[in-house]
Image (cartoon, rainbow, N blue to C red):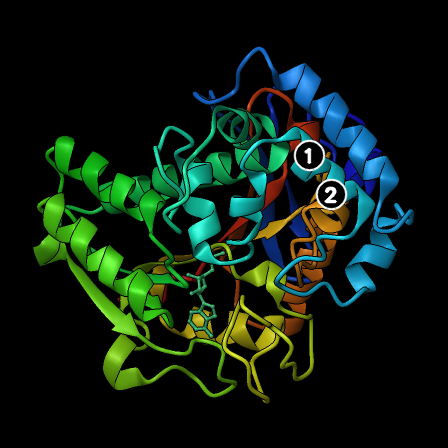
């Protein structure tokens, strides 16, 4: 793999070992970069055709402007602009896609991505065969499922390192499919199933989580918490507890946060309001919940996403701030949290250069008690 991909020679991956670790002076900690290969069950023989079509639509850009930096700085809003010619064309060629676009950027848009085999979208509209193929073969779909599989694996591994059930927190949990899969996997391995606090602001989402927990026999292990996790103040200690959780996961929210500063423009993605946490503040607040020796797992869309222009200009997914690994290490450095080690994972279905997301597993130093 070209070292250029991650911006600096030190981040090159050795093709033979697949991994490389180094001491990053910004964190004064060991950092490793690892590929997580997973097989995507929903990729089909339409992959090439859909990739070519997505590329030609992305060339049409947003009203003819295909620039990704322009798209990131443009105020993309939900609902999307149906008159954009590239989006119109997508709607013409993919039967039913408009019904899915209506769900973007809520957690409900992710549900049929995790499982394109569903008969209906969360808004009651039919899943068409065209839409199933597109959600199965677009890199966004492959990326979301890959990141979910990686969250499942890391959460399960972290639980199984301990003989006692660990306490876990999922921040901005959404429907929490990756964490439910982790609990299922821990249970089927006969290991101690963690206790999880699933935290989100959306009442309907938390009702769904309660339903899934009850249906899967995990009701005793799951507690739902309705909370705005983007207040700048620390989280409410009496509800989440500081320094108590062995595994805290906040995947699927970081890419909406600006590096620093107040923000209040998260139409439909997050609660509107002023004085909300930026990436650095949110990272610090989340880290405070982790027990010494425990892990904080965050994620961010990569700026090398192979279909970034399609996502930003054609689907018009709002507010996303894609970031390189280097930018993310900078943010961790700026937060000044003590980092024991940082393991960076690139979930992909065979080519790390086409990874859509990177996951960042921050190990809190163990104080030896
Ligand atoms: C993109 S989804 C991610 C869901 C899940 N973590 C995943 O990766 O599948 C973002 C979630 O953040 C939640 N959310 C948005 N703003 C929030 C806030 N201020 N406080 C708590 N949750 C919030 C939304 O309700 C939504 O479920």
Q: Position of residue 20 (x, y in %)?
A: 63, 34
Q: Position of residue 341 (x, y in %)?
A: 52, 53
What mark, if any, has residue 54 been given in the picture? Answer: none
Q: CA distance from mark 2 to mark 1?
A: 6 Å
> Which residue in the structure is indicated by mark 1?
92
Density class for disc 1 (Cα within 10 Å; few <14, some 14-19, many ≥20) is few
Position of the C terminus by quadrant: bottom left
Q: How many marks?
A: 2
Q: Nearer the viewer, residue 173 or 204?
A: 204
Q: Nearer the viewer, residue 204 or 63?
A: 63
Is residue 108 something one can see in this rendering? yes
Q: Residue at x 36, y 47 (%)?
A: 124
Q: Describe the element under mark 1 as helix, strand or loop.
A: helix
Q: Quadrant of residue 333?
A: bottom right
Position of the N terminus by quadrant: top right
Q: Residue at x 34, y 53 (%)?
A: 175
> Which residue in the structure is indicated by mark 2?
88
Is residue 198 something one can see in this rendering? no
Q: Nearer the viewer, residue 251 or 174?
A: 174
């Amino acid at each position: 793999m070209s070292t250029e991909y991650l911006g600096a020679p030190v981040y090159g991956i050795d093709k033979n070992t697949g991994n490389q670790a180094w001491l990053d002076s910004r964190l004064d900690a060991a950092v490793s970069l690892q590929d997580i290969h997973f097989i995507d069950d929903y990729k089909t023989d339409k992959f090439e055709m859909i990739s070519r079509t997505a590329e030609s639509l992305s060339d049409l850009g947003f009203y003819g402007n295909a620039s990704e930096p322009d798209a990131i700085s443009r105020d993309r809003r939900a609902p999307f602009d149906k008159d954009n010619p590239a989006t119109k064309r997508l709607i013409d060629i993919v039967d039913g896609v408009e019904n899915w676009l209506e769900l973007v950027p809520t957690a409900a848009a992710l549900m049929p991505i995790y499982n394109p085999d569903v008969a209906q979208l969360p808004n009651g509209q039919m899943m068409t065969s065209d839409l199933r193929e597109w959600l199965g073969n677009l890199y966004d779909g492959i990326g979301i499922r890959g990141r979910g599989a990686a969250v499942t694996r890391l959460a399960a591994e972290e639980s199984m390192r301990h003989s006692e059930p660990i306490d876990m927190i999922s921040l901005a949990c959404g429907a929490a499919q990756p964490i439910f899969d982790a609990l299922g996997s821990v249970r089927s391995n006969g290991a101690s199933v963690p206790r999880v606090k699933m935290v989100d602001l959306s009442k309907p989402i938390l009702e769904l989580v309660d339903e899934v927990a009850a249906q899967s026999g995990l009701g005793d292990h799951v507690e739902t918490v309705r909370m705005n996790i983007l207040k700048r103040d620390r989280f409410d200690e009496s509800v989440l507890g500081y320094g108590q959780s062995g595994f805290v996961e906040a995947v699927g929210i970081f890419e909406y946060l600006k590096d620093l500063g107040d923000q209040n423009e998260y139409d439909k993605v997050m609660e509107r309001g002023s004085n909300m946490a930026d990436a650095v503040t949110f990272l610090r607040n989340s880290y405070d919940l982790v027990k010494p020796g425990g892990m904080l797992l965050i994620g961010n869309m990569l700026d090398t996403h192979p279909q970034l222009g399609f996502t930003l200009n054609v689907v018009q997914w709002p507010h996303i701030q894609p970031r390189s690994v280097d930018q993310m290490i900078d943010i961790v450095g700026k937060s000044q949290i003590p980092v024991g080690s940082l393991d960076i994972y690139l979930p992909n279905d065979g080519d790390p250069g086409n990874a859509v997301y990177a996951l960042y597993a921050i190990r809190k130093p163990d104080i030896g008690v």
